Image (spheres, rainbow, N blue to C red):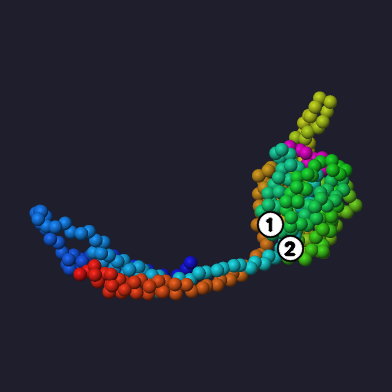
Amino acid sequence: MEFAHPGFFWLMLILPAMVAWYIWRQQKLYGYLNMSAIKGFSTPVKSVMPKLRHLEIIFRSLAFIALIIALARPQSALSWQNSTTEGIDIVIASDISGSMLAEDFQPNRLEAGKNIAIDFIKNRPNDRIGLVIFSGESFTQCPLTIDHSVLINLFSDIKYGMINDGTAIGMGLATAVNRLKDSEAKSKVVILLTDGSNNMGSIPPITAAEIAKQFGVRVYTVGLGTHGFAPFPVQTAMGVQYQRMAVDVDEPTLTKIANITGGKYFRATDNEKLKSIYEQIDKLEKAKINVTEYRKKTEVFLPFALLALLFLVLEFVFKNTLLKGALT
Protein backbone atom coordinates (compact mmCIF):
# COMPACT_ATOMS: atom_id res chain seq x y z
CA MET A 1 0.00 0.00 0.00
CA GLU A 2 1.32 3.44 -0.98
CA PHE A 3 -0.09 6.94 -0.60
CA ALA A 4 0.02 9.54 -3.38
CA HIS A 5 -0.44 12.50 -0.96
CA PRO A 6 0.83 11.41 2.48
CA GLY A 7 0.95 15.07 3.60
CA PHE A 8 -2.77 14.91 4.40
CA PHE A 9 -1.95 12.73 7.40
CA TRP A 10 -0.85 15.93 9.17
CA LEU A 11 -4.57 16.70 9.48
CA MET A 12 -4.72 13.91 12.06
CA LEU A 13 -3.36 16.47 14.53
CA ILE A 14 -6.82 18.10 14.47
CA LEU A 15 -8.43 14.95 15.88
CA PRO A 16 -7.23 15.38 19.52
CA ALA A 17 -8.39 19.03 19.46
CA MET A 18 -11.79 17.95 18.13
CA VAL A 19 -12.21 15.38 20.90
CA ALA A 20 -11.04 17.85 23.55
CA TRP A 21 -13.57 20.43 22.31
CA TYR A 22 -16.33 17.82 22.46
CA ILE A 23 -15.47 16.93 26.08
CA TRP A 24 -15.42 20.61 27.06
CA ARG A 25 -18.81 21.18 25.37
CA GLN A 26 -20.32 18.20 27.15
CA GLN A 27 -19.20 19.55 30.52
CA LYS A 28 -20.69 22.97 29.72
CA LEU A 29 -24.03 21.53 28.54
CA TYR A 30 -24.65 19.06 31.33
CA GLY A 31 -22.51 20.18 34.26
CA TYR A 32 -22.59 18.45 37.65
CA LEU A 33 -24.85 18.56 40.73
CA ASN A 34 -23.23 17.86 44.10
CA MET A 35 -25.39 16.59 46.98
CA SER A 36 -24.40 15.78 50.56
CA ALA A 37 -26.85 12.88 50.62
CA ILE A 38 -29.37 11.29 48.30
CA LYS A 39 -31.59 9.96 51.08
CA GLY A 40 -35.19 10.82 50.32
CA PHE A 41 -34.62 10.66 46.58
CA SER A 42 -35.88 7.72 44.67
CA THR A 43 -33.17 5.60 43.12
CA PRO A 44 -32.94 6.45 39.43
CA VAL A 45 -33.49 3.68 36.96
CA LYS A 46 -30.22 2.84 35.29
CA SER A 47 -30.21 3.35 31.51
CA VAL A 48 -27.61 3.11 28.79
CA MET A 49 -29.25 5.85 26.76
CA PRO A 50 -27.27 8.74 28.28
CA LYS A 51 -24.05 6.91 27.44
CA LEU A 52 -25.08 6.59 23.82
CA ARG A 53 -24.63 10.33 23.35
CA HIS A 54 -20.90 9.68 22.99
CA LEU A 55 -21.56 7.79 19.75
CA GLU A 56 -21.73 11.21 18.13
CA ILE A 57 -18.03 11.97 18.62
CA ILE A 58 -17.05 8.33 17.91
CA PHE A 59 -18.77 8.31 14.51
CA ARG A 60 -17.47 11.79 13.72
CA SER A 61 -13.88 10.82 14.60
CA LEU A 62 -14.05 7.64 12.51
CA ALA A 63 -15.47 9.61 9.59
CA PHE A 64 -12.67 12.16 9.96
CA ILE A 65 -9.98 9.44 9.95
CA ALA A 66 -11.47 7.64 6.93
CA LEU A 67 -11.77 10.96 5.05
CA ILE A 68 -8.09 11.81 5.66
CA ILE A 69 -7.02 8.37 4.42
CA ALA A 70 -9.13 8.88 1.30
CA LEU A 71 -7.60 12.32 0.70
CA ALA A 72 -4.10 10.78 1.00
CA ARG A 73 -5.03 8.62 -2.01
CA PRO A 74 -4.06 5.07 -0.99
CA GLN A 75 -2.81 2.97 -3.90
CA SER A 76 -2.04 -0.70 -4.18
CA ALA A 77 1.25 -1.10 -6.06
CA LEU A 78 2.13 -4.18 -8.12
CA SER A 79 5.66 -4.32 -9.50
CA TRP A 80 7.70 -6.87 -11.41
CA GLN A 81 11.03 -6.95 -13.22
CA ASN A 82 12.34 -8.30 -16.49
CA SER A 83 16.08 -8.91 -16.53
CA THR A 84 18.38 -9.84 -19.38
CA THR A 85 21.89 -11.15 -18.84
CA GLU A 86 24.82 -10.86 -21.19
CA GLY A 87 26.26 -14.25 -20.24
CA ILE A 88 29.87 -15.21 -19.75
CA ASP A 89 31.08 -18.70 -20.64
CA ILE A 90 33.97 -19.90 -18.51
CA VAL A 91 36.06 -23.07 -18.72
CA ILE A 92 38.36 -23.95 -15.83
CA ALA A 93 41.37 -25.92 -17.08
CA SER A 94 43.02 -27.59 -14.08
CA ASP A 95 46.33 -29.40 -13.89
CA ILE A 96 46.00 -32.74 -12.02
CA SER A 97 49.55 -34.00 -12.45
CA GLY A 98 51.48 -35.68 -9.62
CA SER A 99 53.19 -32.43 -8.59
CA MET A 100 49.74 -31.07 -7.62
CA LEU A 101 49.96 -33.29 -4.53
CA ALA A 102 52.65 -31.01 -3.06
CA GLU A 103 51.58 -29.70 0.34
CA ASP A 104 52.66 -26.08 0.21
CA PHE A 105 48.87 -25.52 -0.01
CA GLN A 106 46.44 -27.01 2.49
CA PRO A 107 45.77 -29.89 2.29
CA ASN A 108 47.58 -29.90 -1.07
CA ARG A 109 47.58 -27.94 -4.33
CA LEU A 110 44.95 -30.10 -6.04
CA GLU A 111 42.42 -30.08 -3.18
CA ALA A 112 42.94 -26.38 -2.45
CA GLY A 113 42.40 -25.57 -6.11
CA LYS A 114 39.20 -27.64 -6.18
CA ASN A 115 37.70 -26.10 -3.03
CA ILE A 116 38.41 -22.50 -4.01
CA ALA A 117 37.20 -23.05 -7.59
CA ILE A 118 33.94 -24.51 -6.27
CA ASP A 119 33.36 -21.36 -4.20
CA PHE A 120 34.00 -19.32 -7.36
CA ILE A 121 31.41 -21.38 -9.27
CA LYS A 122 28.78 -20.90 -6.56
CA ASN A 123 29.16 -17.12 -6.81
CA ARG A 124 28.42 -17.06 -10.56
CA PRO A 125 24.89 -18.48 -10.97
CA ASN A 126 24.26 -16.67 -14.29
CA ASP A 127 27.24 -18.08 -16.20
CA ARG A 128 27.77 -21.31 -18.07
CA ILE A 129 30.90 -22.95 -16.66
CA GLY A 130 32.78 -26.05 -17.79
CA LEU A 131 35.76 -28.06 -16.56
CA VAL A 132 38.78 -29.43 -18.42
CA ILE A 133 41.50 -31.45 -16.66
CA PHE A 134 44.95 -32.20 -17.97
CA SER A 135 48.10 -34.00 -17.00
CA GLY A 136 50.01 -35.99 -19.64
CA GLU A 137 46.91 -35.53 -21.83
CA SER A 138 43.63 -33.65 -21.46
CA PHE A 139 39.90 -34.25 -21.60
CA THR A 140 36.64 -32.51 -20.72
CA GLN A 141 35.38 -33.43 -17.28
CA CYS A 142 32.24 -31.31 -17.68
CA PRO A 143 31.04 -29.35 -20.75
CA LEU A 144 29.65 -25.83 -20.40
CA THR A 145 26.59 -25.98 -18.18
CA ILE A 146 24.30 -23.77 -16.12
CA ASP A 147 23.61 -26.75 -13.82
CA HIS A 148 26.30 -25.89 -11.32
CA SER A 149 25.35 -28.65 -8.88
CA VAL A 150 26.37 -31.25 -11.50
CA LEU A 151 29.56 -29.32 -12.27
CA ILE A 152 30.49 -29.12 -8.59
CA ASN A 153 29.96 -32.87 -8.13
CA LEU A 154 32.17 -33.63 -11.13
CA PHE A 155 34.78 -31.15 -9.89
CA SER A 156 34.81 -32.83 -6.48
CA ASP A 157 35.47 -36.22 -8.09
CA ILE A 158 38.71 -35.30 -9.88
CA LYS A 159 41.88 -36.79 -8.44
CA TYR A 160 45.45 -37.58 -9.32
CA GLY A 161 45.84 -40.69 -11.49
CA MET A 162 42.72 -40.24 -13.62
CA ILE A 163 44.99 -39.77 -16.66
CA ASN A 164 48.66 -40.40 -17.46
CA ASP A 165 51.09 -38.21 -15.53
CA GLY A 166 52.88 -35.26 -17.09
CA THR A 167 52.07 -31.60 -17.81
CA ALA A 168 50.47 -30.95 -21.18
CA ILE A 169 49.59 -27.28 -20.74
CA GLY A 170 49.10 -26.70 -24.46
CA MET A 171 46.71 -29.65 -24.75
CA GLY A 172 44.73 -28.53 -21.71
CA LEU A 173 44.34 -25.01 -23.09
CA ALA A 174 43.46 -26.29 -26.58
CA THR A 175 40.74 -28.55 -25.17
CA ALA A 176 39.27 -25.64 -23.19
CA VAL A 177 39.29 -23.39 -26.27
CA ASN A 178 37.60 -26.14 -28.28
CA ARG A 179 34.74 -26.07 -25.76
CA LEU A 180 34.36 -22.30 -26.21
CA LYS A 181 34.94 -21.79 -29.93
CA ASP A 182 31.27 -22.14 -30.90
CA SER A 183 29.96 -20.16 -27.93
CA GLU A 184 27.82 -17.10 -28.66
CA ALA A 185 28.43 -15.58 -25.22
CA LYS A 186 29.49 -11.95 -24.95
CA SER A 187 32.64 -13.03 -23.13
CA LYS A 188 34.57 -16.32 -23.37
CA VAL A 189 37.11 -17.07 -20.66
CA VAL A 190 39.56 -19.82 -19.72
CA ILE A 191 41.06 -20.02 -16.23
CA LEU A 192 44.23 -22.12 -16.60
CA LEU A 193 45.81 -23.49 -13.41
CA THR A 194 49.14 -25.32 -13.42
CA ASP A 195 52.14 -25.81 -11.16
CA GLY A 196 54.69 -26.83 -13.76
CA SER A 197 55.99 -26.34 -17.27
CA ASN A 198 54.83 -27.99 -20.48
CA ASN A 199 56.61 -31.33 -21.00
CA MET A 200 54.06 -33.40 -22.93
CA GLY A 201 51.39 -33.06 -25.61
CA SER A 202 51.36 -32.34 -29.33
CA ILE A 203 50.29 -28.67 -29.05
CA PRO A 204 52.76 -26.08 -27.66
CA PRO A 205 51.21 -23.66 -25.11
CA ILE A 206 51.90 -20.57 -27.25
CA THR A 207 50.21 -22.19 -30.27
CA ALA A 208 47.17 -22.93 -28.10
CA ALA A 209 47.19 -19.29 -26.98
CA GLU A 210 47.19 -18.11 -30.60
CA ILE A 211 44.21 -20.37 -31.30
CA ALA A 212 42.42 -18.91 -28.27
CA LYS A 213 43.03 -15.40 -29.59
CA GLN A 214 41.55 -16.31 -32.98
CA PHE A 215 38.32 -17.45 -31.31
CA GLY A 216 38.12 -14.43 -28.99
CA VAL A 217 38.89 -16.43 -25.85
CA ARG A 218 40.55 -14.59 -22.98
CA VAL A 219 42.89 -16.69 -20.80
CA TYR A 220 43.71 -16.02 -17.15
CA THR A 221 46.73 -18.11 -16.18
CA VAL A 222 47.50 -19.06 -12.58
CA GLY A 223 50.85 -20.46 -11.48
CA LEU A 224 50.53 -22.60 -8.33
CA GLY A 225 53.35 -23.14 -5.85
CA THR A 226 55.66 -21.44 -3.42
CA HIS A 227 59.02 -20.09 -4.52
CA GLY A 228 61.93 -22.52 -4.16
CA PHE A 229 60.95 -25.93 -2.75
CA ALA A 230 57.74 -27.56 -1.58
CA PRO A 231 57.07 -30.71 0.52
CA PHE A 232 55.95 -33.61 -1.66
CA PRO A 233 54.57 -36.92 -0.27
CA VAL A 234 56.26 -40.10 -1.55
CA GLN A 235 54.98 -43.61 -0.79
CA THR A 236 57.79 -45.86 0.49
CA ALA A 237 58.04 -49.21 2.25
CA MET A 238 58.22 -47.25 5.50
CA GLY A 239 55.01 -45.37 4.71
CA VAL A 240 54.56 -41.88 3.34
CA GLN A 241 57.77 -39.87 3.36
CA TYR A 242 58.11 -36.21 2.41
CA GLN A 243 60.73 -34.94 0.01
CA ARG A 244 61.67 -31.39 -0.86
CA MET A 245 60.69 -30.87 -4.50
CA ALA A 246 61.73 -27.87 -6.60
CA VAL A 247 58.84 -25.67 -7.72
CA ASP A 248 58.91 -25.45 -11.51
CA VAL A 249 56.31 -22.92 -12.65
CA ASP A 250 57.00 -21.67 -16.18
CA GLU A 251 56.04 -18.07 -15.45
CA PRO A 252 57.33 -16.57 -18.73
CA THR A 253 55.14 -18.93 -20.80
CA LEU A 254 52.05 -18.40 -18.61
CA THR A 255 52.55 -14.65 -18.78
CA LYS A 256 52.87 -14.77 -22.56
CA ILE A 257 49.68 -16.86 -22.88
CA ALA A 258 47.78 -14.28 -20.85
CA ASN A 259 49.21 -11.36 -22.83
CA ILE A 260 48.42 -12.92 -26.22
CA THR A 261 44.77 -13.50 -25.31
CA GLY A 262 44.15 -10.26 -23.40
CA GLY A 263 44.04 -11.99 -20.03
CA LYS A 264 46.27 -11.73 -16.99
CA TYR A 265 48.85 -13.89 -15.20
CA PHE A 266 48.67 -14.53 -11.45
CA ARG A 267 50.99 -16.33 -9.04
CA ALA A 268 49.43 -18.19 -6.09
CA THR A 269 51.73 -19.23 -3.28
CA ASP A 270 49.11 -20.30 -0.71
CA ASN A 271 45.37 -20.84 -0.22
CA GLU A 272 44.59 -17.22 0.59
CA LYS A 273 46.47 -15.93 -2.43
CA LEU A 274 44.65 -18.37 -4.72
CA LYS A 275 41.29 -17.34 -3.23
CA SER A 276 42.23 -13.69 -3.80
CA ILE A 277 43.07 -14.46 -7.46
CA TYR A 278 39.65 -16.02 -8.04
CA GLU A 279 38.04 -12.96 -6.44
CA GLN A 280 39.98 -10.68 -8.80
CA ILE A 281 38.91 -12.73 -11.82
CA ASP A 282 35.33 -12.64 -10.52
CA LYS A 283 35.44 -8.83 -10.50
CA LEU A 284 37.07 -8.63 -13.92
CA GLU A 285 34.49 -10.91 -15.53
CA LYS A 286 31.09 -9.67 -14.39
CA ALA A 287 27.97 -10.29 -16.45
CA LYS A 288 26.01 -7.20 -17.46
CA ILE A 289 22.39 -7.45 -16.32
CA ASN A 290 19.81 -5.05 -17.74
CA VAL A 291 16.79 -4.75 -15.48
CA THR A 292 13.48 -3.23 -16.61
CA GLU A 293 11.03 -2.54 -13.80
CA TYR A 294 7.28 -2.36 -14.35
CA ARG A 295 4.83 -0.88 -11.86
CA LYS A 296 1.06 -0.93 -11.84
CA LYS A 297 -0.89 1.16 -9.34
CA THR A 298 -4.59 0.85 -8.46
CA GLU A 299 -6.49 3.63 -6.66
CA VAL A 300 -8.21 2.35 -3.49
CA PHE A 301 -9.39 5.64 -1.95
CA LEU A 302 -13.05 4.98 -2.79
CA PRO A 303 -13.70 2.42 0.01
CA PHE A 304 -12.34 4.89 2.57
CA ALA A 305 -14.44 7.73 1.13
CA LEU A 306 -17.55 5.53 1.32
CA LEU A 307 -16.61 4.54 4.86
CA ALA A 308 -16.36 8.22 5.85
CA LEU A 309 -19.80 8.86 4.33
CA LEU A 310 -21.22 5.86 6.20
CA PHE A 311 -19.95 7.14 9.55
CA LEU A 312 -21.40 10.62 8.86
CA VAL A 313 -24.78 9.08 7.99
CA LEU A 314 -24.69 6.95 11.15
CA GLU A 315 -23.90 10.06 13.23
CA PHE A 316 -26.83 11.93 11.64
CA VAL A 317 -29.27 9.04 12.12
CA PHE A 318 -28.30 8.33 15.73
CA LYS A 319 -28.24 12.02 16.61
CA ASN A 320 -31.77 12.52 15.33
CA THR A 321 -33.26 9.25 16.59
CA LEU A 322 -31.77 7.35 19.53
CA LEU A 323 -29.38 10.09 20.62
CA LYS A 324 -32.18 12.66 20.51
CA GLY A 325 -33.94 10.68 23.22
CA ALA A 326 -30.69 10.22 25.13
CA LEU A 327 -30.02 13.94 25.15
CA THR A 328 -33.48 14.92 26.52
Say which element carries label 1.
loop
For mark 1, does the 10 Å Cα neighbourhood hold few (<14), some (14 to 19), or many (20 or more) residues? Answer: few
Q: Does the magenta stretch include residue 102?
A: yes
- Residue 232 lies in the magenta-colored region: no
Vertical placement of residue 9 versus 166, above or below = below
In this rendering, position of residue 34 left or right of residue 125: left
* Residue at the (68%, 65%) spot, across then down: 85
In the rendered view of the protein, which quadrant contains the C terminus? bottom left
Residue matched to label 2: 187
Question: Neighbour class for label 2 at 10 Å: few (<14), some, many (≥20)?
Answer: some
Q: Which residue is drawn at 70% across and 65% down?
A: 86
Note whether residue 190 is visible: no
Mark 2 falls on what kind of element?
Answer: strand
Residue 153 makes an appearance in the image:
yes
Tell me residue 135's x, y (percent): 84, 46
Q: Which mark is residue 218?
A: none
